[in-house]
Image: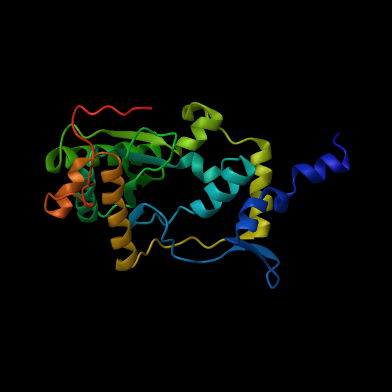
Amino acid sequence: MPSLWEDLSKWDLIDRMKPLLQKGAYYYDPESCKIKKHEVIAVNIPWIFIRRPKWMNCGVWHQVYFQCLKAIHSQCLECYKVVATPRTVRELFDLYELMQQMDFPSKCGVDMRPYTKALYGAYFYTKTLEDGERLYTIVREQISENISPDLPVILKRACTEFEMLRGDSANYEQTEDEKKWEEIVKANVDIPDWDGYQPDIVINHIKRLWIAWAYKSNDMTALEFNDGNDLVVPLRTHHKEGDTQNG
């Protein structure tokens, strides 16, 4: 039987969410007496959303449950995504255009996470394994026909970060603690999901970020978006070939 201190410490939602509250992105609303998120359109993300899945609320599921509580939400267990991995920023732009035509719940952009090998990514979201398998076939065929049959495409479950914490996604099952956290968060957190709208000024900013990221990553297809020219003024060098530097 846990002591009062142990019980209070284990289920202290405010303490667990302190990193988000201290950053100012989340706040405690005195009127509703619930924790809320400031509703803004993010301009510092590398992703362009083609269409947001109506059934997803990653603001709660990933930021609150996973990042703060180290828990997996029940809806995340049902999330399957088709992931395409463009090899160049040229392929990323081509895929972005194709994704707009396909109009599935999806996003694409540059992958800045330090624990992934891919420079770019595109994600198509579904609610079940069966839907994921059907969507995989469609995406694989469309990408092979319109971009390249060699562009990698996979079907995976939930987020990569979950597998880093919990291992093989085939073994995911919600624990009793995670079920209780859902009850606590549902009663105390009110975070309406973002509809995915991004104005042109934000989309253009993100596209520029894609090209700059490619250039930094030595992906020279970035030059295709500047008429083949370098993105910066070439350096003036002052050494002569064969010179050696004396200590």
In this rendering, the count of numbered labels is 0
Position of residue 69 in the picture relative to residue 77 (left or right): right
- Quarter of the image with the C terminus is top left
Q: Quadrant of the N terminus?
A: top right
Residue at point 27%, 27% (across, down): 244
Q: Is residue 67 above or below residue 20?
A: above
Q: Residue at x 28, y 38 (%)?
A: 85
Q: Which residue does the image show at 42% across and 63% down from the upper left?
A: 195
Left or right: where 194 falls relative to 144? right
34 vs 77, left or right, is: right
* Residue 68 rendering spot, x and y as whole percentages: 62, 46
Give the answer, above or below, for where 231 lies relative to 146.
Answer: below
Nearest the viewer among 244 and 14 is 244
Residue farthest along the front direction in this orientation: 246
Q: Is residue 206 above or below residue 234?
A: below
**Of 239 and 150, the residue lying toward us:** 239
**In which quadrant of the rendered view does residue 21 lie?**
bottom right
Q: Position of residue 175 (x, y in %)?
A: 64, 35
Residue 37: percent from left, percent from top: 57, 62
What residue is rendered at 68% in x and 69% in y?
Answer: 32
* Closer-to-camera residue (156/111): 111
**Quadrant position of residue 112:** top left
Left-right relation of 152 to 105:
left
Q: Residue 48's quadrant in the figure?
A: bottom left
